[in-house]
Image (spheres, rainbow, N blue to C red):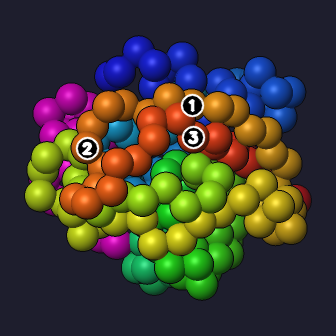
Amino acid sequence: MNPDWINNSPDKILTRAGLWPFTAPVGSVLEVGCGISFRSRCIPSHIHVGLDAHWPYLQKVRDELPEAILVNSNAESLSWLFLNKSFSIVALYDILEHLEKPAGQNLLAVAERLARQAVVVASPIGYVPQNIDIWGMGGDRWQTHRSSWSQADLIASGYSTTTEKRIMSDAKRHTSIDVPRECTMVYGIKVMK
C-alpha cells in the first residue's frame, strides 16, 4: 500500500482534526468503491469489506489482502445488498464525485442506513476533470468524474468536516484536459445516533 495513503488515510486526517471518535477497533468496515487502494483497511477493524463495480480492481485487492471480503457490485446496488445497520462504519472514499449529484446524495443516505456507528467521506472539493482509469486497468467508465462536492454539502447533511490540500499523483487523468495536481479534499464523518 502506498505510504502516503497510510499516513494520510481519512481516519488519520479526521483524527488530526479531532473528529475521529474511535479509540478501539470497530467490528466491521464497508468501503464502497474501494478500487485497488482499499484505504479503509487503515481503520482498525475485525472485518473489512470492499465493494467495487470493476472486477479487475477486486482481483488486485485479493492478491494483496486475501483476508478481505470483496463484493463485485456498483454503489447503486447497496440498498438491496445489505441490511440496515450491517456495518460499524461505511467508508465513501473518493466515490461521490464519480456519481451524478442525485445518485451521490442517495448513496450518502443509503450509507447512513447501513452504518451502526459512522459514515466517513473523502472527496475533492469542486469539479476535478477525470475520464481515465489512472491505474490503467480498463475502468475508465467507473473512474470518470460526474459531480462536484463541497464542504457545505457535507455539513448540510450533518457531517463534521475538515479540509486538506493534497497533491495528486502525476498520472494522466483526462483524455483532453491537463488537470492540475493540487486539489483540496474534504473529509467528513457523521456519527450515527
**Which range is magenta?**
54-74
| Residue 78 position in % (x across, y down) | 46, 74
Residue at x 38% of width, y 40% of height: 38
Name the residue type under label 1: Arg
CA–CA distance between discs 1 and 2?
Answer: 16 Å
Specify the amino acid type for callout 2. Answer: Lys
Judging by the rendered image, the residue that carries numbered circle 2 is: 172
- Give the label, 1 or 2, closer to the camera: 2
Q: How crowded is mark 2: few (under 14 residues within 10 Å), some or many (20 or more)?
A: some
Cα separation between marks 3 and 2: 15 Å
Residue highlighted by disc 1: 166
Q: Where is residue 24 in the image (x, y as percent from the top left)?
A: 70, 24
Q: Is residue 58 magenta?
A: yes
Disc 3 marks a residue whose amino acid type is: Cys
Q: How crowded is mark 1: few (under 14 residues within 10 Å), some or many (20 or more)?
A: few
**SS for tag 1?**
strand
* Percent coordinates x, y for residue 188 in the rendering: 73, 48
Direction from residue 71 to residue 94 in the image, left or right: right
Q: Contact (CB < 8 A) between labels 3 and 1?
A: yes
Q: Residue at x 82, y 68 (%)?
A: 157
Q: In 3D space, how far apart are the residues under numbered discs 3 and 1 (Cα atoms)?
A: 5 Å
The residue carrying mark 3 is 183
